[in-house]
Amino acid sequence: MTRLLLDTCAYLRLARRVKPLLGIAFGQKQYVLTVLPDVENEVLRSGRLRHLFPWFSTDEAVAAERLAQAVRLNRQGLQELDVAAKFLHDWVVEEVLSFTSRGRTPPSPVDCRVLAFGQVHGAAIVTDDLAMHDLAATFEIEVMHGHELLAKLRTAKMIDNDLVREIYEALERNGDLPVTWRTAKHKAFIKVFGPGVRSAS
C-alpha cells in the first residue's frame, strides 16, 4: 500500500465529486488517499473556505468519510510529527526570502505539518502549492500535483472522462484552476480534452 496524503486544497478540489475518495486502494501501487485532521480545523476556522466550500460541512456522507479515514496517530507518532513540522516551519521562517523572491507565499504551519507527515511516515503528498513543492524538494519529500492524482484515478478507472471534464469545469468556474492543471489539460488528459489549439509560430 502507498499512502497519499492530500493537503487541504487538493482535498477540496476533489472530494465533492470523487466518491468514494478516501481509504480506497487503487492502481498497481495500491494507492490509498487520506487527510490529516488539520484539514477539518483549517476549513472550519476560515470564513473564506467555508463560504467557497459550503458542502464541506453540509454533505454528511463526505464528512463521515473524512472523519472515518483521517490519519490517526498515537502519542509518539504525534510527537514525532510535531517535531518534524516545527523543524520545517523554522526553516521556512529562516529562508522566507527564498519563497517571496519567487512570488510565492511561504508554506504555513499546516503546510509544514502535511509535509512533515510525508517525511516521518513515508507518505507522498498531493498538493498544488508550488512553495510546498519547493520545500519538499529541499528535504526530499515525495510530492505530486493534484492533476497527477486525477490522472492516476482515471487510469485506475476510479473516475471516467466525463468526471474529469466536470472537475475541470467546476474549478474553472470557481476561479480555482491552478496553472499546473491548465498546462496538463491538453497533455495528461489529451484523450479527454484533445490536443488543444496551438498558437501560430
Image (spheres, rainbow, N blue to C red):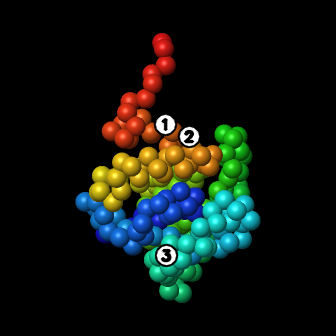
Residue 65: percent from left, percent from top: 47, 76
| Cα distance in 3D space between marks 3 and 1 | 32 Å
User: In the rendered image, which residue does mark 3 sit on?
Assistant: 61
Q: Is residue 85 above or below residue 99?
A: below
Q: Amino acid at mark 1?
A: Thr
User: In the rendered image, which residue does mark 1 sit on?
Assistant: 183
User: In the rendered image, which residue does mark 2 sit on?
Assistant: 179
Q: Earlier in the sequence, mark 3 or mark 2?
A: 3
Residue 23: percent from left, percent from top: 39, 73
State the mark number for residue 47: none
Image side of residue 76 versus residue 46, left or right: left
Which of discs 3 and 1 lies nearer the camera? The answer is 3
Front position in the image: 85 or 59: 59
Circle 3 Cα neighbour tier, 10 Å, few/some/many (<14 / 14–19 / ≥20): some
Q: Amino acid at mark 3?
A: Ala
Q: Are marks 3 and 2 in contact (CB under 8 Å)?
A: no
Residue shown at the point (71%, 57%) measured from the top left = 93
Q: Is residue 79 above or below residue 110?
A: below
Q: Amino acid at mark 2?
A: Val
Q: Secondary structure at mark 2?
A: helix
Q: Is residue 156 above or below residue 195?
A: below
Residue shown at the point (29%, 57%) measured from the top left = 156
Which of discs 3 and 2 lies nearer the camera? The answer is 3
Residue 164: percent from left, percent from top: 42, 49
Residue shown at the point (59%, 69%) measured from the top left = 56
Front position in the image: 113 or 21: 21
Image side of residue 86 versus residue 73, left or right: right
Circle 2 Cα neighbour tier, 10 Å, few/some/many (<14 / 14–19 / ≥20): few
